[in-house]
Amino acid sequence: MFSNDDLSSLRWDAVSGAVEIIDQTLLPHTLRWLHLDSLPAFCHAISHMQVRGAPLIGVTAAFGLAAAIAKNPDDDNVRAASATLLATRPTAVNLRWALEQVQSEVADMPPSQRARAAFNKAVQLRAQDIASCAQIGEYGLTLLRELSAGKTLNVMTHCNAGWLAAIQWGTALAPVYKAFAAGLPVHVWVSETRPRNQGMNLTAWELQRAGVPCTVVADNSCGQLMREGLVDCVIVGSDRTAANGDVCNKVGTYLKALAARDNDVPFYVALPESTIDWHCQSGEAIPIEERDALEVLSIAGVDASGQALEVNLASPGTRALNPAFDVTPAALVSGLITEHGVFQASKSGLGELSAQLLK
């Protein structure tokens, strides 16, 4: 029924328009597909992180807006549905970008034609994401070949920027998958990524499924690994990149960038052009989402019998602050790996990319 391959985070049926996503909150213990068929369902999936990762959030939102338009294609509903989806996650710029793409597609159409056009646009954005991530992988592979020198290449990553965060390939992991497919010896240091553990729960899970050698490490050990010479490069993703090259990504990214700079380890950011916020002049203007303190004060898992459970880590009444992202200054970034090539993380570097896009 569904047109997808095994390594895809969102699948759809071309006839009925049905959309299914992996409930990522259940990984790595349970792989379950969820059917999304209404605006509230799409909003819940995004806000509760059943889908996450900037590229996937954007594509999911596009399908969500298409579903809302199918129920009511009037202008007021299109605007209201878009605003509702936009409010689900404030940091990832792909969300706004994808919604604007769908709105622009249907703006000048009669209401009777909007539903099909919106759905087709969502499908197009899905295909575009796959192609973009595959190309990011190719440009990143060139960098990894230069670093490998015939030995096993140790790549460190943070959070999850693989195919679970996109549609296929991913961003930061796309060069790793391309390297592995090309026979390049590669090993990935997977930082756990507290408090939600997306590295341990998602990145390690998908690397293991692909057969890529990987090792989970505590977030606080990453600087020491670099200091011991056990890391050849760091590649992370981005939820929003400012026009000056500042990068907003999962909290903890900034600390890795600092450690990488101190130990002369290349620190790359892999992202599609849709993740660049051309209207945002610097990272200081990027809103940082603050999530529930319970994510810090508790942890979810399964017991010895396989029963899912959540365990409190702190004493009753403990307060916690839970910023979901941080900003890494452009000066700490060795390069931005995009589907159009590798660019310097600076206003001039992104200016070169902008000029290339206008040709």
Image (cartoon, rainbow, N blue to C red):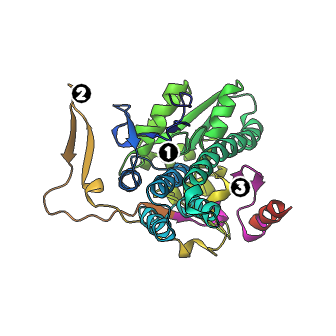
Q: In x, y percent, where is residue 215?
A: 48, 33
At label 3, the amino acid type is Gly
Can you say whether 88 is above or below 145 in the image?
below
Can residue 264 be seen at all in this image of the molecule?
A: no
Instruction: Give the left or right position of residue 76, taking residue 299 as reference.
Output: right
Can you say whether 190 is above or below 316 in the image?
above
What residue sits right under mark 2 in the picture?
Answer: 306
- The numbered mark, 3 or 1, whose residue comes first in the sequence reads 1
Can you say whether 271 is above or below 352 in the image?
above
At label 2, the amino acid type is Gly
Residue at screen point 56% across, 31% down:
3
At label 1, the amino acid type is Asn
Labels 2 and 3 touching (C-beta < 8 A): no
Q: Give the secondary structure at mark 2.
A: loop
Q: In x, y percent, where is residue 244?
A: 68, 70
What residue sits right under mark 1 in the picture?
Answer: 160
Residue projecting furthest to the left: 316
> Can you say which quadrant of the picture contains the C terminus?
bottom right
Q: Give the secondary structure at mark 3.
A: strand
Q: What stretch is highlighted in magenta?
A: 327-349
Residue at screen point 59% across, 42% down:
170
- The numbered mark, 1 or 2, whose residue comes first in the sequence reads 1
